[in-house]
Image (spheres, helix red, strand yellow):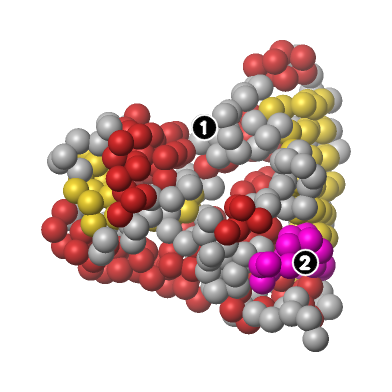
Amino acid sequence: MKYALIGCGRISPNHIVAAQKNNLEIVAICDLEEHNMKDKRLKFRLPDTVHSYLDYKEMLAKEKPELVAIATESGKHAQIALDCMTLGHANLIIEKPIALSLADADKIIETAQRENLKVCACHQNRFNKSIQKIREAVEMERFGRMFHGTAHIRWARDYEYYSRAKWRGTWEQDGGALMNQCIHNIDLLRWMMGDEIDCVVGMTDRLHHDYIEAEDLGIALIKFTNGAYGIVEGTTNVYPKNLEETLYLFGEKGTVKAGGASVNVIEEWNFSDMLDNPAQVKAQFHENPPNVYGYGHTPLYENVIHAIETDTQPYVDALAGKRALELVLAIYQSAATGEMVKFPLTDCDTIRFQGRFDQS
């Protein structure tokens, strides 16, 4: 299967490795900066048959890839995705967030349906072994009635991180801690708690990073339509380095905690049905990835390839990507207005929050 990558920055190595491990025919890489492409060529020993492009439209026309991964600035995801589908008739893996507006997310979903193409939102943590085990318990209804769940993202991002890419932390191209660093765990919380939300109350602030536009702290209370509750707490203010990313689920008959650098470790596992040994589960589902991106890209790619070949939907489809985006935008809107936000959220984007933390 012919494959191309658009965007050769910080996350691109995970995509290249996943493509290689899944035996995709890498035909092209594309980036606005030549040095980014040269770096990836050397690092991953890409052969001369892999062509480099500064213009993704030219790449689509010449290479005609069947699968394209988009790993650019977040604010460019949507337009590139729409062009890939309409101009190149390509299936897609789109890095998170799938878009920065609900309207654009809807366009991606509608275009994929119209063109009969597969679109995967790259929420790779759903493929963590720990998360798969927890999801199995949810689908087996081992928790009984779900009471509440919490997602905590306690990370550090310094001036160097933002200075290396000026788009980071801007409302036009990124958003803040919730949209960039926290959206993976926000996706997991919504997914595990039943997806459907009644309302959200959120608070956000920029406490430490006065050189970015968006928030570095976000807190939210979520009420799901099934009567359960959720809490999100995310920040990039932790000193001196990333502390943890944790997911808690509390039900009538079960309690689970996934922790570690990026929810790769089951730290608590207790169920009334006693179907398995908690100590054995914690020992078995204990991964230690080299970075917060984890090991999920490779199985995510495998799933997308299977979806294309069998004409089925990817495990993490475009609608899943929209749901994670919707929840972050709802938190932003609640924080900006000081009001509770009811679901579904029908019209929202990051641009409307420009100037949110400007000094008067």
| Residue at x 84%, y 78% (from the top left corner) | 338
Q: Is residue 44 visible?
A: yes
SS of the residue under disc 2: loop
Q: Describe residue 298's horizontal placement relative to residue 37 as left or right.
A: right
Quarter of the figure with residue 354: bottom right
Q: Nearer the viewer, mark 1 or mark 2?
A: 2
Task: Choose top left, top right, bottom left or bottom right for residue 108.
Answer: bottom left
Percent position of residue 93, x then y: 40, 51
Q: Residue at x 48, y 47 (%)?
A: 10
Residue type of the residue flagged with mark 1: Tyr
Q: Which residues are magenta?
A: 194-217
- Which mark, residue 295? 1
Q: Is residue 208 magenta?
A: yes
Mark yes or no: residue 116 visible: no
- What x and y, as percent, mark residue 128? 57, 33
Q: Which residue is mark 2?
A: 206
Name the residue nearer the viewer: 237 or 305: 237
**The disc labelled 2 sits on which kind of residue?**
Arg
Q: Pick whichever, 134 or 206, lies toward us.
A: 206
